[in-house]
Amino acid sequence: MKDLRLLIGGSSSFFFHLQEFSNTLNNLGIESKLVFDADYSDGFPGRKIGKWFQTGKKFTKLIDEYKPDAIFIDRQRHFGINSLKAGIPLFVLLRGHYWSEMDWNKRTMYKSFPKRIALSQWDKIGKEIFAGATAILPICKYLEKITKKFVPGKPTNVFSEGVDASKWYHVEGLELKHPCVGLLQYANWWGKTSEMLVLKKVLERMPDVHFYWVGDGPLRERVLSELNGYNNFHWLGRLQYPDKVREYLSEIDVYALITGMDLAPLSLKEAQLMKKPVVATNVGGNQEMMIDGRTGFLVEQGNHEQLVDKLSLLLEDKELAKKMGEQGRKFIEETFNWELVTKKFIKIAESYLQSTKK
């Protein structure tokens, strides 16, 4: 379907990666246009009230001028609602466990009456988008199983977000103390972030190894209050992406993802592209993003003994670490390259669009 015209409405957080997707579509002969979703559709409970009454006409003009055959979105916002109202087939990329996150927000961060009203509206928008979508595209097989449970009967297809391997190469710049382990993760949900506290026993058992955390988020201080007292733990804050992150990943010896839940973490893919052996908690979709025993090791949640054992092995056995690093880059290049991911999406889109025309 070479005449397919796809409109992509993206969030600012992942615009960089959606641009790679859009570029790959265009290279494959599929016309696509990427826009920041909130510039064309906004409303209650969005924070910028002035946009509520301005974006409606902009969205209508965008649709009239571009005339998309389908729309692709990466979050549940007003752009998706307006797409459904326009009667255009809608593909919804699902990056997170929407239902678990919504429940956690209700119980923790959104307890006040105004915040509960806002969260209720976001939930209403999300459910309307899921119900009206042509297909939901969970980011990993683990999330697809969850999606089928919460939206039974809705077509789903895994969209394994790609990575541009050409942008991940060794560079000089950042200087760290060695031996060292790198952690790159956002602290925004305690069910996920609390696993980092297992590092307390790891830091005690590995006093000569330096652990560098790159990340930020609303739970940052909660983590730092527990770990900052250790001389071998260092917080580097948020690094500019991708250049400074590339410097960081170039310098570390081993990458560790210590998490209570993750689905398809880009940092895990990017670390492997940088030929770093990886150690990750065996939760969510992590096992789909690496090969246990070949590109690194999976460890069980809360098991600091396994963490110490696998990290020590990779730091001491340089040949094993190098071999796993090289296999890691090969695995990511072959499994998550944008051309492969995009061709799969094109087939999915063609299938659904042809069936709707019958």
Image (spheres, helix red, strand yellow):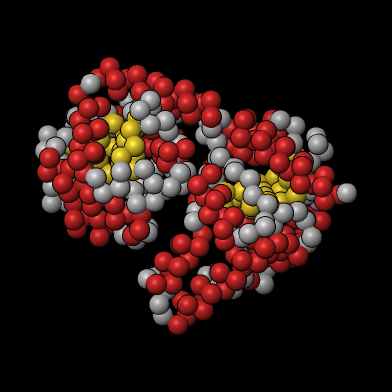
The reply, left or right, for residue 241 in relation to residue 250 is right
Residue drawn at x 75%, y 49% is 70
Q: Position of residue 234 (x, y in %)?
A: 21, 44
In the picture shown, does residue 88 fall above or below 28? below
Residue found farthest to the top: 319
Residue drawn at x 44%, y 25% is 329
The one nearer the camera, 96 or 58, is 96
Q: Position of residue 152 (x, y in %)?
A: 63, 59
The one nearer the camera, 244 or 302, is 302
Q: Is residue 95 visible?
A: no
Counting every numbered tag in the picture gives 0
Answer with the quarter of the image where residue 249 lies: top left
In the picture shown, does residue 106 fall above or below 342? below
Answer with the quarter of the image where residue 248 lies: top left
Looking at the rendered image, the quarter that the N terminus falls into is top right
Q: Is residue 289 visible?
A: yes
Answer with the quarter of the image where residue 287 lies: top left
The reply, left or right, for residue 289 in relation to residue 2 is left
In the picture shown, does residue 137 fall above or below 273? below
Residue drawn at x 49%, y 56% is 97
Q: Position of residue 225 (x, y in %)?
A: 19, 58
In the picture shown, does residue 102 fall above or below 353? below
Residue drawn at x 23%, y 52% is 197
The reply, left or right, for residue 88 in relation to residue 18 is right
